[in-house]
Image (cartoon, rainbow, N blue to C red):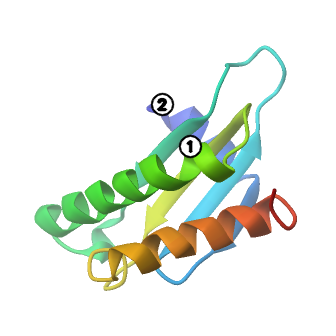
């Protein structure tokens, strides 16, 4: 996801907080797009540009490992970094946070 309207649509849908991130998810309308789409964002509260980029890189890698396993086709996901948590949390714990958030968003998991 790269366009602001796509991010805003996800912001109006389901959300779930995990220890190191917030996750927003929405089911797209039929015919809108195919596959799973993922977006990443970090506000300036996370830190300077270096800290925000590091947090987004970690979120991207966690998503690359977890979304194919628990994500659902036809859904958009937005991962939002948290200050002092996303960039410093152990990477396995970061992936576990994402797994937990996806299970909550999809009603108990697959």
Q: Residue at x 12, y 64 (%)?
A: 50
Image coords of residue 11 (percent x, y): 65, 53
Image coords of residue 14 (percent x, y): 76, 58
Image coords of residue 46 (percent x, y): 30, 74
Q: Residue at x 73, y 52 (%)?
A: 12
Residue 7 got which mark? 1
Q: Residue at x 31, y 61 (%)?
A: 58
Nearer the observer, 94 or 80: 94
Q: Is residue 92 left or right of residue 50?
A: right
Q: Quadrant of the C terminus?
A: bottom right
Q: Secondary structure at mark 1?
A: helix
- The reply to whether residue 11 is visible in this rendering is no
User: For the residues marked 2 and 1, what is the alpha-carbon distance in whole angstroms?
Assistant: 7 Å
Quadrant of res 34: top right
Do the residues under discs 2 and 1 have CB atoms within 8 angstroms? yes
- The reply to whether residue 23 is visible in this rendering is yes
Residue 84 got which mark? none
In the picture of the structure, the residue carrying the numbered disc 2 is 3
Mark 2 neighbour class, 10 Å CA radius: few under 14, some 14 to 19, many 20 or more? few
């Amino acid at each position: 996801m790269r366009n602001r309207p796509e991010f805003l649509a996800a912001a109006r849908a389901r959300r779930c907080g995990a220890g190191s991130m917030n996750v927003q998810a929405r089911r797209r309308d039929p015919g809108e797009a195919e596959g799973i789409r993922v977006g990443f964002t970090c506000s300036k509260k996370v830190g300077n540009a270096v800290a925000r980029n590091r947090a987004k890189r970690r979120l991207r890698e966690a998503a690359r490992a977890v979304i194919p396993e628990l994500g659902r086709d036809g859904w958009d996901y937005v991962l939002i970094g948290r200050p002092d948590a996303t960039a410093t949390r152990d990477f396995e714990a970061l992936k576990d946070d994402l797994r937990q958030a996806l299970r909550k968003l999809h009603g108990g998991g697959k």
